[in-house]
């Protein structure tokens, strides 16, 4: 059948996202096709990955482009083929200010690389020699005719002239087009044909403390608490009596001082010591049973002091270089003002009673959970306004208790509003729950999250988990590693003694940019309440003054101070994305490294730290370490120097090293890696 000029041409089908001339697919880091922003941090290099390919055999290349919040192109980087045969490319970019950034990947045809491949083969084989050299000359002339620095253009024109000079031997002409100078010019200003950009993908960039910091948790009521023999009752510590402890915490080098809830505590169904159902006279109750006639979430427990006292506490912490984080638990004691003022905010059972919190078989009779399906707008406004109160009093970080039991749409709205009005405020999700919920809390706006670190103990478990949080989920979830919390004391920590506390502190402080220590860690508090993974005489239910003078005996306080100093001195430990696990010959010895390149380092120098840990708190272990020299920035190097930042010892190592670690003396090495 013939088609004459009057036959209508079929309309082109509507394509939602046309593929480029040089296809670019499987871009990372991208969340939900770019509907939500990936996570970025000021001064933190992050990897951009994509699959880039084309039809036929001509060479392709790709560029990653970083776009600043004002829409200007901030920087770009050529992507490297990191998986031969799979067309997988990678480059690293680095934002330098907070805000909503974006990035894209540009695939393009690389005529110079195509010519190099073909010309090298053909000239060597004596096939189409003059034709290939002439085409190379024309190609470099075209490249030189662009807007280039004068010296770069001159280099290309000189090479084009050599390629066109028939008085020279073909090999010499070809060498002119393949020179290092030509390659350097075209690496800095590549000749790009058929440029095919992806859409721009969002990147939310936060301040440094959103990713990197050392947290110290304390119950302020325990500091200065004492038993009054006259009355036979405990007297609570206050913000004023807790202030002297700030200096010791700051001296250990912590960045964040995290306070458990400081609000009035209800008396109805108040929990007694060790979570008993019957509180004795004078038992303070759990600070998570929030609310009494004295006030709710926007009030301070009268026994702790006043807002003036709280302000003084925050100011003193800031004087010592720390910011204050406050624990927010969105639940209410039966005595909370909201219960009488807004009974519709809770769930009423068939018998007319308000449902208390349950996680069967666990029951929490002293708290009522909020029902976010009842008056969601009223609840939202109340919580937002409550948080604003604490921000106005200097709180810049919030540790949110059990955020996974509240609707994600609530968090998405609240976190977006705070990001707009208070971009400096950081939210940490205490979400020990299923991976999908943990990741999505990060995706909708949480800056960082608790993790499964406390339960990862074997070499295999730790190696897999370190790799996961650094390379697989870092764009959506910033990890916080806590060896223990006021709720968690794992069997490993119960049984391993001081060595367990030491090695887990090393793993937490070096394996994650953010880690945290619960008060009393320095004293190796490791006796569990029978049947549960938490301490006996839990501080949640009683005052717990401590003899800090005895902390020196364990050496843990000194270790924490040393680890925090090392973290401050080595920018490699403050970054999240570049971590490599190195094979060892002993299953009780874990080795991993972290590295930051000189172009991204705040010191202007590359920084590499190699961590080796004996995971057995009881026995000495020896091991060979088979080092990935390229990951250490030492490709082509036979030997290098390591300096153990824990004790100052120096050694000369090669690609295979030997270690012996005695948990009674030193359970780990934290090595600064330096070329000879």
Image: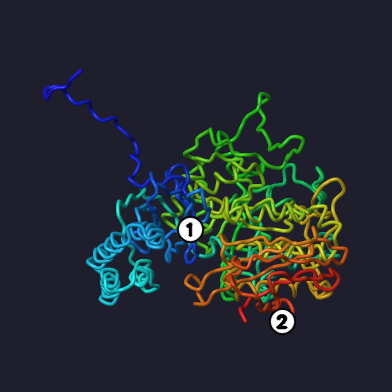
CB contact under 8 Å: marks 1 and 2: no
Q: Residue beneath label 1, please? A: 40
From this viewpoint, which residue is outermost toward the top? 1
Toward the viewer: 639 or 333?
Answer: 639
Q: Quadrant of the N terminus?
A: top left
Name the foreground residue: 157 vs 433.
157
| Colouring used for the render | rainbow
Disc 1 secondary structure class:
strand
Residue found 47% across the figure and 60% down from its top: 206
Could you tell me residue 385's position as x and y percent? 49, 50
Residue 106 % position (x, y): 36, 53
- Callout 2: few (<14), some (14-19), or many (20+) C-alpha neighbours within 10 Å? few
Sequence-earlier tag: 1 or 2: 1
Residue 318 falls left or right of residue 228: left
Q: Tell me which residue sits at (88%, 64%) in the image.
A: 619
State whether residue 659 is above or below residue 651: above
**Is 635 situated above or below 528?**
below
User: Quarter of the image holding residue 554?
Assistant: bottom right
Residue 597 coordinates in the image, percent (x, y): 52, 70
For residue 68, say whether it is visible: no
Task: Identify the residue under disc 2.
Answer: 650
| Farthest-out residue, front | 126
Residue 164 seen: yes
Which mark lies nearer to you, 1 or 2? 2
Identify the element where label 2 is drawn. Answer: strand
């Amino acid at each position: 059948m013939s088609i004459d000029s009057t036959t209508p041409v079929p309309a082109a089908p509507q394509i939602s996202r046309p593929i480029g001339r040089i296809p670019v697919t499987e871009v990372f880091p991208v969340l939900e096709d770019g509907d939500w922003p990936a996570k970025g941090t000021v001064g933190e290099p992050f990897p951009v990955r994509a699959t880039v390919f084309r039809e036929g055999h001509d060479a392709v290349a790709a560029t990653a482009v970083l776009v600043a919040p004002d829409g200007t192109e901030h920087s770009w980087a050529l992507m490297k083929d990191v998986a031969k045969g799979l067309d997988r490319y990678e480059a690293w970019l680095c934002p330098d200010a907070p805000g909503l950034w974006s990035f894209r990947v540009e695939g393009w045809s690389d005529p110079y690389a195509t010519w190099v491949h073909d010309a090298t083969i053909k000239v060597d084989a004596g096939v189409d020699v003059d034709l290939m050299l002439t085409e190379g000359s024309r190609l470099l002339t075209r490249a030189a005719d662009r807007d280039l620095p004068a010296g770069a253009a001159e280099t290309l024109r000189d090479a084009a002239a050599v390629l066109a000079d028939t008085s020279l031997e073909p090999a010499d002409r070809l060498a002119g087009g393949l020179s290092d100078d030509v390659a350097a010019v075209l690496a800095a200003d590549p000749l790009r044909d058929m440029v095919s950009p992806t859409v721009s993908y969002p990147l939310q960039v936060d301040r440094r403390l959103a990713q990197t910091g050392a947290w110290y948790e304390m119950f302020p009521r325990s500091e200065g608490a004492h038993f009054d023999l006259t009355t036979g009752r405990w007297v609570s510590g206050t913000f004023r009596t807790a202030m002297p402890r700030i200096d010791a915490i700051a001296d250990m080098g912590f960045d964040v001082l995290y306070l458990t809830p400081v609000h009035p505590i209800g008396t109805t169904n108040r929990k007694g010591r060790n979570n008993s159902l019957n509180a004795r006279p004078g038992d303070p109750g759990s600070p998570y049973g929030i609310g009494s006639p004295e006030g709710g979430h926007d009030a301070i427990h009268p026994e702790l002091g006043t807002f003036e006292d709280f302000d003084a506490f925050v100011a003193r912490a800031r004087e010592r270089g720390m910011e204050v984080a406050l624990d927010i638990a969105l639940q209410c004691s039966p005595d909370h003002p909201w219960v009488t003022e807004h009974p519709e905010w809770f769930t009423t059972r068939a018998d007319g009673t308000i449902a208390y919190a349950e996680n069967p078989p666990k029951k929490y009779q002293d708290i009522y959970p909020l029902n976010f399906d009842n008056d969601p707008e009223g609840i939202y406004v109340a919580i937002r306004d409550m948080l604003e109160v604490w921000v106005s009093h200097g709180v810049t970080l919030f540790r949110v208790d059990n955020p996974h039991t509240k609707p994600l749409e609530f968090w998405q709205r609240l976190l977006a509003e705070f990001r707009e009005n208070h971009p400096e405020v950081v939210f940490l999700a205490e979400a020990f729950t299923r991976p999908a919920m943990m990741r999505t809390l990060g995706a909708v706006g949480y800056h960082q999250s608790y993790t499964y670190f406390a339960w990862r103990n074997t070499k295999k478990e730790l190696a897999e988990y370190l790799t996961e949080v650094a390379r697989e989920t870092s764009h959506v979830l910033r990890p916080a590693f806590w060896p223990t919390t006021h709720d968690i004391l794992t069997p490993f920590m119960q049984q391993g003694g001081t060595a367990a506390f030491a090695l887990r502190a090393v793993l937490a402080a070096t394996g994650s940019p953010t880690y945290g220590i619960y008060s009393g860690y320095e004293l190796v508090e490791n006796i569990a309440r029978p049947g549960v993974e938490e301490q006996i005489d839990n501080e949640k239910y009683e005052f717990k003054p401590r003899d800090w003078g005895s902390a020196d005996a364990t050496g843990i306080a000194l270790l924490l101070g040393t680890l925090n100093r090392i973290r401050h001195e080595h920018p490699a430990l403050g970054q999240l994305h570049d971590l490599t696990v190195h094979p060892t010959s002993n299953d009780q010895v874990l080795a991993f490294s972290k590295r930051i390149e000189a172009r991204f380092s705040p010191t202007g120098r590359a920084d590499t730290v190699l961590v080796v840990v004996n995971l057995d708190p009881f026995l000495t272990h020896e091991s060979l370490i088979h080092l990935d020299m390229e990951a250490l920035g030492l490709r082509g190097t036979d030997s290098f120097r390591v300096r153990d930042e824990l004790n100052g010892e120096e050694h000369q190592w090669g690609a295979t090293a030997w270690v012996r670690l005695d948990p009674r003396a030193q359970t780990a090495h934290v090595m600064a890696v330096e070329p000879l």
